Amino acid sequence: MERLVGEVMHHGVLTCRRETPIQDVARQMSEQDVSALVVVNDEGNMIGLISRTDLVNARLYEQYWKHWRGLTAGHIMVTDVVSVRPGDTVQDASRLMMERRIHRVVVVEDAGEGVKPIGVLSVTDVVRDIARN
């Protein structure tokens, strides 16, 4: 029987708000040893994702952007976030990650007008699952 995302994913997500300064985003990623934060609105619905790669890309433009230190998560977050549901198969989620050339997908549940992030499935989670079975 095919494993489901909900059985393999990392439960819970670390979040920030659109207005969070990128220095605080970087600090949280570093202190929590994670490679991405989900950006949420006041209702806790996902509105974006910001990764370490996004921060590094933003830093590359520091010499061009006079106000780099004033940037927030909202300025550099990705809004086209790839997400899956806990009932999706790990195989389908893995295929999606490979096709999109990404390292993680956000696991979400419907929440009225938006979606609430409830976990993350990363390529590391998939590899750990392979090693167990």
Image (spheres, rainbow, N blue to C red):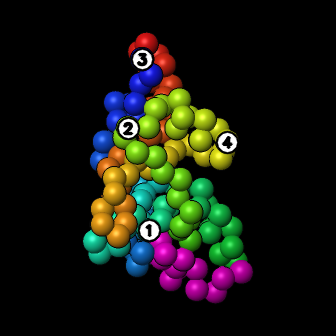
- N-terminal of the two: label 1 or label 4? 1
Q: Secondary structure at mark 3?
A: loop
Q: Amino acid at mark 2?
A: Gly
Question: Which residue lies most toward the top here?
Answer: 133
Q: Secondary structure at mark 1?
A: strand
Q: Nearer the viewer, mark 1 or mark 2?
A: 2
- According to the picture, the residue beneath numbered tag 1 turns out to be 47
Which residue matches tag 4? 99
Q: CA distance from mark 4 to mark 3?
A: 23 Å
Q: Earlier in the sequence, mark 3 or mark 2?
A: 3
The span picked out in magenta is 64-75
Identity, as a three-letter code, of the amino acid under mark 1: Ile
Residue 52 at what x, y percent from top left? 54, 55
Q: Magenta stretch containing residue 65, yes or no?
A: yes
Q: Position of residue 3 (x, y in %)?
A: 41, 25
Q: Which residue matches tag 2? A: 87
The amino acid type found where label 4 is placed reads Glu
Please tell me which residue is depicted at 38% across the width and 38% down the height of the picture: 87
Q: Nearer the viewer, mark 4 or mark 2?
A: 2
Q: In the picture, which quadrant includes the C terminus?
A: top left
Q: Is residue 44 magenta?
A: no
Please tell me whether mark 4 sits on a helix, a strand or a loop: helix
> Which residue is nearer to you in this view: 34 or 27?
34
Badge 4 or badge 2: first in the primary sequence: 2
Residue for point 37% across, 66% down: 114
| In the image, residue 52 above or below residue 10 | below
